[in-house]
Amino acid sequence: MTTAGAPKEREPLLVVNGLGAGYGGMPALRNVSLEVRRAEIVALVGSNGAGKTTLLRALSRVIPCTGTISFNNDDLVAKTPDEAFATGLVQVPEGRQLFDRMTVADNLLMGAYRRRDRAAVANDLDRMYTLFPRLGERRTQLAGSMSGGEQQMCAMARGLMARPQLLMIDEMSLGLAPVVVEQLMDVLVEIRKQDVTVLLVEQDIHLALSLADRGYVMDTGSIARSGAAKDLIDDPAVREAYLGLA
Ligand code: ATP
């Protein structure tokens, strides 16, 4: 599955150190450190309320945080959400948040709103229809009228239209049929071949670890465990606490 050399050999893209964040004085993240290397798929897993979405919000600079975030050797903490997006850090939000009354094609173009390279945007639109043939068939359909799986495809394609360096996907599999989830996983493997790095946030821990190169397990706002995804799947503590396996 690994295509760009062993993960250890790759250069870090995102380096987070000692990150803290909270809501109204209540801490939701404590001393979180993690690293994502170029062209890796990294899983961020943990149960409900562990702080995964909060971490993505802090990385996207939507909420204040303490600690350091280096992205592509740039200091993200000093940036606004729009500036962070412009550096190539793109979030596919939980619940997709599509423009329901716009067509699939217009939703995808919204992902490219900052780009001025029109010819390349048109090419990327075609590339999305190749990556997600279902979206190609439904390009003129209103996004809000599509199935959950199709909407997730549309949200991922919209994120890719921004030409991200890091695509952070929040709860990709939530509420979707296994067959659709498999198609989405195939797409992640394909986009990684095209050098897009992926941070995959999932409550479905087994799914995420079976796809990822490395993983971080979050528990009540902190990183409880990290390592190669295959080692985490075999880790007795992870198996018992998170996978329901002895
Ligand atoms: P889930 O998968 O259920 O979304 P999560 O791991 O993404 O879980 P977060 O949504 O980051 O967890 O929540 C972490 C903690 O922060 C929880 O205790 C949650 O109640 C709290 N929290 C999240 N959003 C807010 C908010 N807008 N205001 C106050 N507290 C919040």
Image (tube, grey):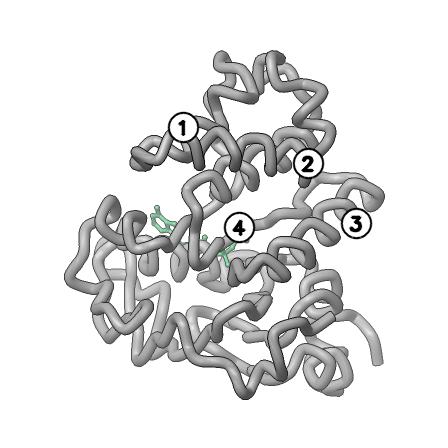
Disc 3 under 8 Å from ligand 1? The reply is: no
Disc 2 under 8 Å from ligand 1? The reply is: no
Disc 4 under 8 Å from ligand 1? The reply is: yes
- Quadrant placement of the N terminus: bottom right
Kindly indicate whether the residue at mark 1 contacts the one at mark 2 (C-beta within 8 angstroms).
Answer: no
Residue type (three-letter) at the residue carrying disc 3:
Glu
Residue at image location 48% in from the left, 60% down from the top: 52
Give the mark, 3 or 2, whose residue is nearer the N terminus: 2
- Quadrant placement of the C terminus: bottom right
Residue 77, x across and y down, in percent: 20, 64
Secondary structure beneath disc 4? strand
Q: Nearer the viewer, mark 4 or mark 3?
A: 3
Kindly indicate whether the residue at mark 4 contacts the one at mark 1 (C-beta within 8 angstroms).
Answer: no
Give the mark, 1 or 4, whose residue is nearer the N terminus: 1
Residue type (three-letter) at the residue carrying disc 1:
Met
Badge 3 density bin: few <14, some 14–19, many ≥20, Cα 10 Å: some
Q: Nearer the viewer, mark 1 or mark 3?
A: 1
Rounded to the nearest angstrom, the CA distance separating label 1 from label 4 is 19 Å
* Residue beneath disc 2: 130
Q: Is residue 114 above or below residue 22?
A: above
* Residue beneath disc 4: 170
Count of marks, rendered view: 4
Give the mark, 4 or 3, whose residue is nearer the N terminus: 4
Q: Is residue 185 above or below residue 210?
A: above
Kindly identify which numbered label has been placed on residue 222: none
* Residue beneath disc 3: 182
Toward the viewer: 76 or 234? Answer: 76
Q: Nearer the viewer, mark 3 or mark 2?
A: 2
Q: Is residue 199 visible?
A: no
